[in-house]
Image: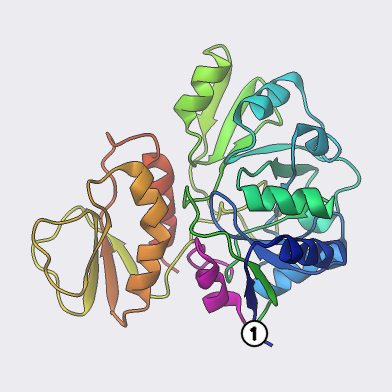
Amino acid sequence: MPAKIYSPTPINLRRLAKVLRDGGLVALPTETVYGLAANALDTRACRAIFSAKGRPTQDPLIVHVLDLAHAEELATFHPLARRLARRFWPGPLTLVLPKKICIPDIVTAGRATVAVRSPAHPLTRQLLRRAGIPLAAPSANPFGYISPTTAAHVRDSLGKKISYILNGGACSVGVESTILDLTNPAALKILRPGAITAADIRKFIGAKISLQTAKPTHQPRSIGQLAPGLLPQHYSPHTPLLIKSAWTLLPPTVAGIYVQRPKKILGPNCFWLSERGAGQAVAKNLYQVLRQADQGGYRQIWIEALPANADGLTAAINDRLQRAAAKR
């Protein structure tokens, strides 16, 4: 039976919370992208996530919780981690910390750390409250493909693999959360950029603590990763994607995606990410436009990268584009 999209009525929220408590899968909205959720404390339920997505078990899952108190039941927090959680939660910041024994190895790819965050989307927070369990939830799409930002995206790509999708509208951020490695409180490291920027974190913690940004590196799949979304090729359309600084001629077999709406529309193969090139709009529309171009039957997709002097979301957007364009 194909997946059904459920409207967020109280009856449906109760039904979906029970599905999660009983070990089932539910695709749900967050402020970043739609996630495929299961009980994070249930090994069998979490294994079903990997099966539905075709995801390698060496790629860990992010665990979603209602608040800091619930997070401390799953991970060991030090004072700086608590400060950051209180400042940026609920919101698109994932913290990597030593895990507690209750977290199954399937969730963490066998590592001694767990990635945890408190999402801001009100419907996900209602499900967390109603279900009363932490939820492991990677993006609700086939592994490596463009992340979903609407319920329809989930149905289009996973509709034959899952049964339940909660409709929460379009995601407000549009790119995955920032992942911050806090295992060494004296040397923090951003593993994946997102809407919470390095500048946001530096401003809050002060200059006395080191903050690095990890570069994309290939890790053998025999080794469990520290956090999800770190493989060099990810978030990719089926159509080959090329990042180009500019072009004057757009062949009819190529979809061209501009950061800003061009002054001259070249044809039906011309797409754009925002009206004025603002980073927030670009991030929100990125995956939607990539999917539209990918479904157009083109031989290639050309896309502009944001300039280095754009706003704070630039690092996250360009990170996703670089991984989406990486050679298979």
Image coords of residue 184 (percent x, y): 69, 26
Q: Residue at x 14, y 73 (%)?
A: 267
Splitting the image into 4 quarters, where does residue 293 fall?
A: bottom left
- Determine if residue 130 is in view: yes
| Residue at mark 1 | 2
Q: Residue furthest bottom?
A: 1
Image coords of residue 232 (percent x, y): 49, 56
Give the magenta range: 143-159
Q: Is residue 92 above or below residue 26?
A: above
Splitting the image into 4 quarters, where does residue 255 fall?
A: bottom left
From the viewer's side, name the closer residue of 315 and 282.
282
Splitting the image into 4 quarters, where does residue 113 fall?
A: top right
- How packed mark 1 is, by other alpha carbons closer than 10 Å (few <14, some 14-19, many 20 or more), is few
Q: Residue at x 25, y 46 (%)?
A: 277
Q: Residue at x 51, y 35 (%)?
A: 196
Q: Residue furthest right?
A: 101
Q: Is residue 41 above or below residue 162?
A: above
Does 299 sit left or right of 228 as displayed? left
Q: Residue at x 68, y 41 (%)?
A: 118
Q: Is residue 154 above or below residue 117?
A: below
Quadrant where the C terminus sits is bottom left
In the rendered structure, does residue 288 fall within the stretch colored magenta? no
In the rendered structure, does residue 144 fall within the stretch colored magenta? yes
Quadrant where the N terminus sits is bottom right
Amino acid type indicated by mark 1: Pro
